[in-house]
Image (cartoon, rainbow, N blue to C red):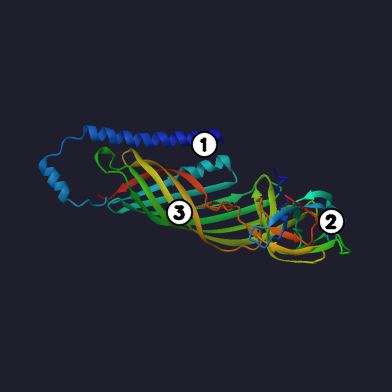
Amino acid sequence: MCEDIATVPVRIGFFEDNNTDDPIAVSLDSLTVYGLGNDSLIYNNRPNVAQIELPLNSQQDSCAFIFILPQAPSEFLQLDTIWFYYDRKATLISMECGFSTFYELNDISYSKNRIDSISLDNLNVRNTLDEHIKIFPDNTPADNE
Amino acid sequence: MNISRYFLIILLLIMSKQVISQNDIDSEDEPQSTLNEAVSDTLAKPTPDSFVRIGFDLSAVARQFFEPEVRQFEFSLDSEVYYNWFAIFEGGFANVRATERPFDYNAQTYFGRIGADYNLLPRTGTDKNNSLSLGIRYAYGLSTHEASNFLIRNDYWGDSDGNLERTNFHLHWIEFSGGLKTEIFQNFYLGWMIKTRVRIFESRNPELTPYYLGGYGHEKRRAPVMIHYYILYKLNFN
């Protein structure tokens, strides 16, 4: 149990914008994600991805992730970079599990090669199962859920 | 944990049954009022009793068995200001000290609550000193806390350790309560009270979230519901 809450992740869902307040969740055919400055892959060509969890850097107030989205039906670049800017707050989860870091998201920035837009829905990244961010891929060759 | 929950429920039922039984006995044994007494009762305006009741929160002590890192002392003072209306002051302090852990965490909280209870029970016969009350309180707590030698695990970006200096944290909240007080011997009472708390203002601590706030509970709970058990002694001034 303590292992599950050691790192509090930011949760991201993928959606198709249907010009309503209730966008449609989509699954990407495949996705690769790794942190900027870190060679280790968090998701390695993972198929049918609808939601992902990313660990924010608990030593700095910002970090970035490289997204390699599915091959577009054109010559567009596959790579996108998303930057997260946040405040960190050390939190004693319990006497047994010790400390973790909660985050309050301040801003994000991103490239728009394969990403159309991103919405910040929940700024508080705590030890809950809430989704924080929606990504709307551009011209996604995806399967609707 | 289940055993303690059953124990609490049984204790609540026993104390509630005692008050209800006393009400039944009193109504059976009570002699018929004479016409003169009835007339005088309707004319007499009920007046509040003159007393101060001192209470000690037993559940704050019992908490140490379940969570030995948290030690809390809590007392209460109440007095009847209008008939069936009781002014309440509660106060106390709490210490949190992480022991035998790979990190150090220390916190102290001083807290106070002020408010009123309204008694719903009729005050007749031998159980006239028992009360079933609803109440509201305004509460304030001031905490200082510090942490050192703690490790934050991050398997992807790397672990980090930290030390945070002593800082203050303020919390204002409103409590809604309901409970029972039963006179078990002359001027000695046992009571329980269910309380829920709603935050109205808190200071922001940019670096460290308080673990436990004395008088309120765990910081992570937004509206905790807690049961308190009291032993009380009444000082009469009549």
Q: Are marks 2 and 1 on the same chain?
A: no
Describe the element under mark 1 as helix, strand or loop: helix
Name the foreground residue: B114 vs B103: B114
**B140 lies above or below B56:** below
The answer to whether any part of residue A83 appears in the image is: no
Q: Which residue is under mark 2?
A: A70
Q: In this rendering, which labeled residue sits more in front, label 2 or label 1?
A: 2
Could you say where residue A113 lies in the image, as x and y percent from the top left? Answer: 82, 65
Describe the element under mark 2 as helix, strand or loop: loop
**Image quarter in which the N terminus of chain A is found:** top right
Q: Which residue is under mark 1?
A: B5
Query: Label 2 lies in what chain?
Result: A
The span from disc 3 to disc 1 (Cα, nearest Å) is 22 Å
**A86 lies above or below A6:** below
Q: Residue at x 48, y 50 (%)?
A: B196
Query: Label 3 lies in what chain?
Result: B
The answer to whether any part of residue B29 appears in the image is: yes
Q: What mark, if any, has residue B175 been given in the picture?
A: 3
Could you say where residue B36 lies in the image, as x and y percent from the top left? Answer: 10, 43
Q: Is residue B175 left or right of residue B45?
A: right
Disc 3, disc 1: CB below 8 Å?
no
